[in-house]
Image (cartoon, coloured by chain):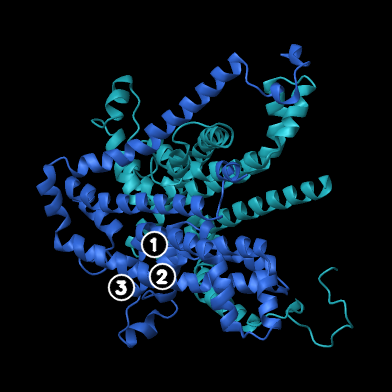
Chain colours: A cyan, B blue
Amino acid sequence: MVMMPETKARKTWSLVTRNSPLPGFRLSMGFTLTYLTVIVLIPLTAILLHGARLGFNAFLHTVTAPRVMASYRVTLGSAATAALLSALFGMLLAWVLARYRFPGKRIVDALVDLPFALPTAVAGISLTALYAENGWIGRYLEPHGIHVAFTPLGIVMAMSFVGFPFVVRSVQPVLEDLDPAMEEAAASLGASVWQRFTRVIAPVAFPALLTGTALAFARAAGEYGSVIFIAGNMPMKTEITALLIVTKLEEFDYTGAAAIAGAMLALSFTIMLAVNLIQWWVQRREGKRV
Amino acid sequence: MSGRGANSSSALLQPSMQQRTGRIVLIVAALLFLAVFLVLPVVAVFTQAFSQGWKMYADSIHQEDVLSALRLTGLVACISVPLNMLFGIAASWAITRFEFHGKSLLITLIDIPLAVSPVVAGLMYVEVFGLHGWFGPWLSEHNLHVIFAVPGIVLATVFVTFPFVARELIPFMQAQGSDEEVAAVVLGANGWSVLWRITLPNIKWALLYGTILAASRSIGEFGAVSVVSGHIRGQTTTLPLEVEMLYNEYNFTAAFAAASLLTLAAIVTLVLKKTIEVTSGVHRHTEEKEAQS
């Protein structure tokens, strides 16, 4: 309603809803849409159409084959575990960075982004070297019967590595913006530390934590580079779905690869939708409060 | 704890002995986590790379295959990053300076590459340009190669770094508003001089920040590039792919030597990012806010 032109109703429909004195709308919008179409929309359509060409039954048969189902279990199970670990440690880091002063804080803050900056292949071989039987960490875990490299635990490690910065970067700004006066008010009314955390901080930080965890889960579920080195890649046991797509491609089974990719895209878009809903919910809630 | 009600308001948040211990425990736990989880892998890369001594390290890096992989990685970044800068500027200009139908849909579409698995991203281009893809037969008729060649690697890299610049610029330009630009236009400036003299100087730090993120990702991209590359040594192997190939040949020292170059690039990225955050207003955190007030 607000977006409608306030002056007299136009005869022709126009893309622009409010006139601006600035130039360049056609040029910038035209370039944006063309680029988006060529780079994202056409390739996305190609893969979805290829998957759809199979027909419903064949598609369902391909994406629910036992080896594919096993790869979903490995991928989603590991990604969910990694997302929970990311939520836990991400929350800890966001809290420490937002609330406390300590020497070297800037370095720690910069370091949190390392998994974004470090190429996934490098993370993969490095984690494998650390957690292998004779690695710096692995050699202390193996005698206790804890096998990380080439087991689902290794997949969880790699997925947590790439996922936890999403939680820190989602939660940290919210904690920083939280007015200390609210906590002071709660404290002056006799609230304990635990009560201040659960009643004042948690309700504000929760949507951000949920967003960050969803992003970490999405990244973990699609992750390839850091996982394949440490996973062992045993079909039915430690084979992730992304690797299965690559395997299908190497066997020249393009249709099978496209079908599984379609299933993964469905998951990606569901998570995107969920994140957008969380943000919409937060905006509405904040709108009500003001 | 309820017995401290008589104190002044700020004293209420003064930590008790117990809370100070809790604070130290949390800080130590966070630092330990980072040391084991982030610092140790970086140290391991360099230790493995130098495990056979300096000479072996230098020899590993001076292999012709590694050098050509390094050149290809540089070339791909030099093509894909400027393209995405151009897109970022155009998209943020259209989105933040005009009101139009479907704006939030457009913003969501720009985020798609962040949600898609890199392997699926690579496969998308195989579907379009591969031999069995839409344009594959036409391309091979004209002897043009996209998949298993450099253009495919560039496309896959453009896709995975697609939103980085735009996502930095859109909130930044939205917050900045368009008053200065409108004033310039009203006073008779044309569009290009507004862009060069007002918009670009105003957004330069956010633009640089997004560019660094895009460059870092384009240097390190593995999954998407791996699908379209074909792994032809000396021709379609980027540095991350060379790391993988050396590693799979059990040439661990050489793999970690090549990986150490990528790790250095990552460290440079983090330093540049933090420098921009501290010196400019981009992504400013509390500590800098406090220092300013």
Q: Which residue position is annotated with label 2? A: B80
Depicted B102 relative to depicted A214: above or below: below
Residue at 24% over, 57% down: B242
Q: Does any portion of residue B155 appear in the rendered image?
A: no
Q: Looking at the rendered structure, which numbered label has been put on residue B218?
A: 1
Judging depth in this view, the residue of A166 and A83 nearest the camera is A166
Residue extending farthest to the right is: A8
Q: Local crowd at mark 2 within 10 Å, few (<14), some, or many (≥20)?
A: many
Q: Which quarter of the rendered picture does the N terminus of chain A lie within?
A: bottom right
Residue A228: x and y, percent?
Answer: 35, 47
Residue at 50% over, 74% down: B86
B156 sits to left or right of A284: left
Amino acid type at circle 3 is Ala
Image marks 1 and 3: residues in contact by CB distance under 8 Å = no
Q: Which callout, 1 or 3, points at the residue further toward the start of the chain?
A: 3
Image marks 1 and 2: residues in contact by CB distance under 8 Å = yes
Q: Chain of mark 1?
A: B
The secondary structure type at the circle numbered 2 is helix
Q: Local crowd at mark 1 within 10 Å, few (<14), some, or many (≥20)?
A: many
Residue A154: x and y, percent?
Answer: 38, 37
Depicted A58 relative to depicted B51: above or below: below
The secondary structure type at the circle numbered 1 is helix
Residue at 74% over, 33% down: A181
The secondary structure type at the circle numbered 3 is loop
A63 sits to left or right of A273: left
Q: Which residue position is annotated with label 3? A: B149
Instruction: Determine the CA span between mark 1 and mark 3.
Output: 16 Å
Answer yes or no: are tags 1 and 2 on the same subunit: yes
Depicted B114 relative to depicted A216: above or below: below
